[in-house]
Amino acid sequence: MGWTLREVAERSGISSRFLSDLEAGKGNISVSRLADVARALDVPITSLMPSEEEQKPIVALVGLRGGGKSSIGKSLAKHLNVPFLELDHLIEKQANLSLAELFSLHGESYYKRLAYDILLKLLAPNKQMVIATGGSVVTDPETWQLLKRRTHTVWLKATPEDYWKRVLGQGDTRPMANRTSAMAELRSILTLRAPLYAEAAETIDTSSVRVAEAVRMISTTLRQKDEQVARKK
């Protein structure tokens, strides 16, 4: 529905923090309070209790630009026979602006708000897909928590030199144009974000792994997760 947790909290009378735990499968909620949530959403209470068979693996690729999110994402989606979506492209389409224009006119906070809203709508139907996220998605706590709760997150990491080389190979020289400190800035951003990226469920070093091998590794992890669920049954 595109609502924030705060809006659902106001409609249901249940705190945002408790709703966040409930969404993550951690909340120990009573039937009556769950009914309050269902009424707030105007859905049957049974729709809030999907079985494990109904859960579909959604893969979210994170990391800096040049890590291989597009190439690996497309190949993985083809292998799994599911849609491949790039979050930044969806943001540009909704805003009817390029990312450069969006940041210039509205700033980073607007970008983050659009990213969160779009991801909420994408994840709501629980349909399997592969999503390539923007490099800064992990810096917004609410969005990053949403991805970690609802998707299989994969950090595609690489060396700063490989990030640099790949971006240049895509024909984009803007990040480095007339900036002698560009590499130092890249290293600094990577250092700051690495602890957040490392919270992903899986990490693949694309400086040492080719696209086909990365796809195999992610597919294997998804299959093992499915097998674990089956054994629990």
Image (cartoon, grey):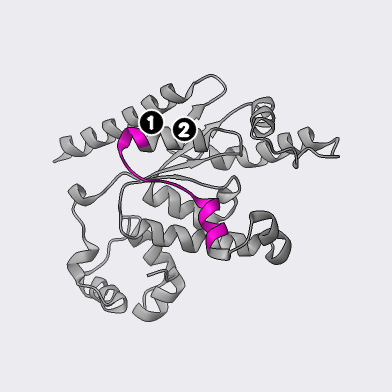
Reply yes or no: does residue 80 show up in magenta: yes
Which image quarter: residue 33?
bottom left
Local crowd at mark 1 within 10 Å, few (<14), some, or many (≥20)? many
Residue type at the position of mark 2: Ile
Q: Position of residue 65 (x, y in %)?
A: 61, 39
State if disc 1 and disc 2 touch (CB < 8 Å). Answer: yes
Tally the numbered discs. Answer: 2
Q: Residue 103 — which label?
A: none
Q: Secondary structure at mark 1?
A: helix
- The residue singled out by tag 2 in the image is 72
Where does the magenta region start and end?
78-93
Helix, strand or loop at mark 2: helix
Q: Considering the whole magenta stretch, tell me its main secondary structure.
A: helix
Mark identifier at residue 218:
1
- Residue at image point 30% right, 54% down: 126
| In-image side of 36 versus 95 (left or right) | left
Q: Is residue 87 above or below residue 202?
A: below
**Residue visible at 54% across and 19% down in the picture:** 208
| Left or right of 179 in this view: 40 | left
